[in-house]
Image: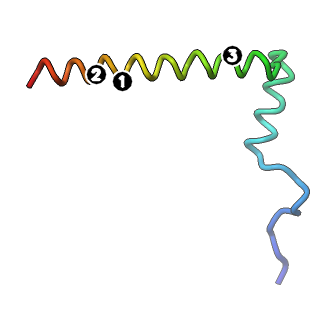
Amino acid sequence: MKKISSPKNSSSPFSRIMRNGHQKTGYKVRNGELLMCMSEDDHKRIARLISKWLENSA
C-alpha cells in the first residue's frame, strides 16, 4: 500500500497561502509586530468594557 502523507520538508497549504499573501501585500515583520501590539491593546480595552457592562447589569 502506498503512503499518501506529505514529505516532512514541504510546508502546509496554509503556510503557502500565508507566504503568498505576504508577498503580494508587501508584509514586513516590523509592521506585523506593530499591528499585533495594537490589537492586543484593543482586546484589553474590549475586556474592560465588557466587565463594566456586566458589573452595571448586575
Which residue is at a point 81% across and 19% down the rendered structure image? 27
How far, Cα to Cα, is label 2 from label 1? Answer: 5 Å
Which residue is at a point 82% across and 32% down the rendered structure image? 19
Q: Tell which of 20 and 45 is nearer to you.
A: 45
Query: Which numbered marker is on residue 50?
Result: 2
How far, Cα to Cα, is label 3 from label 2? Answer: 25 Å
The location of residue 48, given as percent across then percent down, is 33, 20
Q: Is 5 positioned to the left or the right of 41 in the image?
A: right
Q: Is residue 1 above or below residue 18?
A: below
- The secondary element bearing badge 1 is classed as helix
User: Counting other residues with Cα less than 10 Å from the Cα at mark 2, is it few (<14), some (14-19), or many (20 or more)?
Assistant: few
Which residue is at a point 82% across and 19% down the rendered structure image? 28
Q: Earlier in the sequence, mark 1 or mark 3?
A: 3
**Residue under label 3:** 34
- The secondary element bearing badge 2 is classed as helix
Residues marked 2 and 1 touching at CB (< 8 Å) = yes
- The secondary element bearing badge 3 is classed as helix
**Residue under label 1:** 47
